[in-house]
Image (cartoon, rainbow, N blue to C red):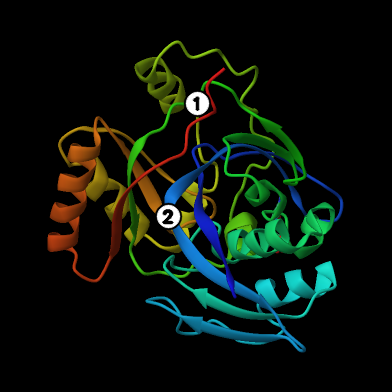
């Protein structure tokens, strides 16, 4: 019997680039949340590794040791028969392969070695809101982050993360500072509006369609905030309600049938 695993989309609500190490990796300060939308995996112990990729974004995804899920199983020292259903676009700033790899580690063990698979894999081991610092390795849970009604939009451009980091001119931007205790969702959204994704401007310089994506989101009724996630090109809008998010997603989809558009909810902090 195969075990089913879920690999939620990762959204960088903020992404401050605060420095660069001698080895080229960037220091980040990012508030990360997860969506109730993601890839699905089926894992089954097997004599030797095998991988089959299906779903709307299966095209171009390797079915061998180049795939992070394969490498995650090897790292954990297990042989699996894996089916991976790609619901999320990849190379898209929303976790993709990192979340898939983390889902494998969650189910078969080996969490402590997650960072070996990529800077974004450790944060994807939990679906709780987290502050990610260092190069992605320093994680802390953030209390009081509300669940948000979101629309995710990807205009279909594949963003090479290293190139976007290279195009960033200032590497020593201010960090988020002490996180406040947000008494309610409006305060959270007001605070979030004052934060940044420092990779947004260099990503727009590389792929100007990202500016159109942000404009399409912010033009919809009930949109409170728009920003790019990760190194792009997926952008998110925070909406006043699930109904407003659904209506916006339908309108953007109708105007841009070739874009990937999804209404979703993010997972908030556990109460208490
Ligand atoms: O670790 P991962 O393979 O996900 O990172 C992809 C690329 O993104 C790295 O090769 C590096 O160019 C860039 N990166 C960075 N600083 C980070 C994370 C990623 O410069 N903290």
For the point 76% across and 89% down, which residue is it? Answer: 48
- Count the marks: 2
Horizontal arrangement in the rendering, residue 61 relative to residue 120 (left or right): left
For the point 69% across and 82% down, which residue is it? Answer: 66
Q: Nearer the viewer, residue 120 or 144?
A: 144
Task: Name the residue tied to disc 2.
Answer: 204
Horizontal arrangement in the rendering, residue 2 relative to residue 184 (left or right): right
The answer for how far apart the CA atoms under marks 2 and 1 are is 28 Å
Quadrant of the rendering where the N terminus is positioned: bottom right
Label 1 CB less than 8 angstroms from ligand 1: no
Q: Nearer the viewer, residue 198 or 154?
A: 154
Can residue 94 be seen in the rendering of this structure? no
Quadrant of residue 64 within the rendered picture: bottom right
Can residue 150 be seen in the rendering of this structure? yes
Q: Mark number for residue 260?
A: none
For the point 60% across and 50% down, which residue is it? Answer: 168
Residue 155 vs 217, above or below: the answer is: below
Q: Quadrant of ligand 1?
A: bottom right
Q: Nearer the viewer, residue 219 or 86?
A: 86
Horizontal arrangement in the rendering, residue 264 relative to residue 89 (left or right): left
Task: Name the residue tied to disc 1.
Answer: 145
Crowding at dot 1, Cα within 10 Å, few <14 / some 14-19 / many 20+, comes out as: many
Q: Are marks 2 and 1 in contact (CB under 8 Å)?
A: no
Q: Where is residue 248 in the image (x, y as percent from the top left)?
A: 18, 46
Q: Which of marks 2 and 1 is in front?
A: 1
Q: Where is residue 109 in the image (x, y as percent from the top left)?
A: 78, 59
Give the SS element for disc 1.
loop
């Amino acid at each position: 019997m195969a075990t089913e695993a879920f690999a939620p989309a990762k959204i960088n609500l903020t992404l401050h680039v605060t420095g660069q190490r001698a080895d080229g990796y960037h220091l980040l300060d990012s508030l990360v949340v997860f969506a109730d939308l993601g890839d699905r995996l089926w894992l089954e112990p097997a004599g030797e590794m095998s991988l089959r990729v299906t779903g709307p974004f299966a095209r171009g995804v390797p079915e061998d040791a180049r795939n992070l899920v394969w490498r995650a199983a090897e790292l954990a020292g297990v042989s699996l028969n894996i089916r991976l259903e790609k619901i999320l676009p990849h190379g898209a700033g929303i976790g993709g392969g990192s979340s898939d790899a983390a889902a494998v580690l969650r189910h078969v063990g080996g969490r402590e070695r997650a960072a070996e698979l990529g800077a974004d894999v450790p944060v994807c081991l939990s679906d709780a809101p987290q502050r990610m610092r260092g190069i992605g390795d320093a994680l802390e849970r953030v209390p009081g982050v509300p669940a948000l009604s979101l629309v995710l939009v990807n205009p279909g451009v594949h963003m090479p993360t290293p190139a976007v980091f290279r195009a960033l001119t200032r590497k020593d931007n201010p960090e988020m500072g002490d996180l406040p205790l947000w008494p309610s969702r409006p305060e959270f959204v007001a605070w979030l509006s004052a934060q940044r994704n420092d990779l947004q401007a260099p990503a727009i310089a590389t792929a100007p369609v990202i500016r159109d994506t942000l404009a399409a989101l912010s033009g919809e009724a009930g949109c409170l905030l728009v920003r790019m996630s990760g190194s792009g090109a997926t952008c998110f809008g925070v909406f006043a309600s699930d109904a407003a998010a659904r209506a916006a997603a339908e309108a953007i989809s109708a105007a841009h049938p070739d874009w990937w558009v999804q209404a979703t909810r993010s997972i908030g902090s556990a109460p208490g």
